[in-house]
Image (spheres, helix red, strand yellow):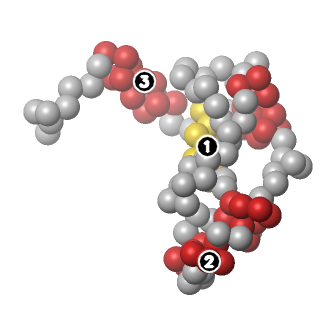
Amino acid sequence: MENKYYKPSAVNRKMREWFQDSKFGMFIHWGVYSVLGDGEWVMHNKKITVEEYERLPSLFNPTEYDPAKWVRIAKNAGMKYITITSKHHDGLLCTIPKSAIGTLWTAHHTEKMC
């Protein structure tokens, strides 16, 4: 069904086609909820209060992660893309500078990853 209000640009249509043809990729959901060893729905699933959750950012200091390793794993498995969801309902945003991974994975339009 054609949407009469939204007309994707040629670039948008090309990227959609690329994504659909790529078929195999990695989605990484990463944020302060990782401190609890759980996913982004941890507040809901474990009935955590806002006050309790607000303590997590001070505990989230991801110094021992290796984004280059993430990329190598994905490439070695034949994946064509990585999507990192780094900002969730909690409003906190994780970023990895392009310089950290830019030469390892050529993405069509990725500036930052985390």
- Tell me where residue 5 sits by quadrant: top left
Mark 2 or 1, nearer chain start: 2
Report, in whole angstroms, how far the alpha carbon at label 2 lies from the one at label 3: 41 Å
Q: Residue furthest left?
A: 4
Amino acid, disc 2: Glu
* Pointer 1 local density, CA inside 10 Å: few below 14, some 14–19, many at least 20: some
Percent of width and height locating residue 20: 43, 33
Percent of width and height locating residue 30: 66, 53
Tell me what residue is drawn at x 79 percent, y 28 percent.
Answer: 100
Amino acid, disc 1: Ile
Tell me what residue is drawn at x 19 percent, y 31 percent.
Answer: 6
Q: Quadrant of the C terminus?
A: top right
The residue beneath circle 3 is 15
Report, in whole angstroms, how far the alpha carbon at label 2 lies from the one at label 1: 26 Å
Residue 75 vertical position relative to residue 91 in the rendered view, above or below: above
Residue 65 vertical position relative to residue 46 in the rendered view, above or below: above
Tell me what residue is drawn at x 82 percent, y 54 percent.
Answer: 61
- Judging from the image, what secondary structure is the residue with disc 2 in? helix
| Residue 61 visible in the shown view | yes
* Pointer 3 local density, CA inside 10 Å: few below 14, some 14–19, many at least 20: some
Numbered badge on residue 9: none
- Judging from the image, what secondary structure is the residue with disc 1 in? strand
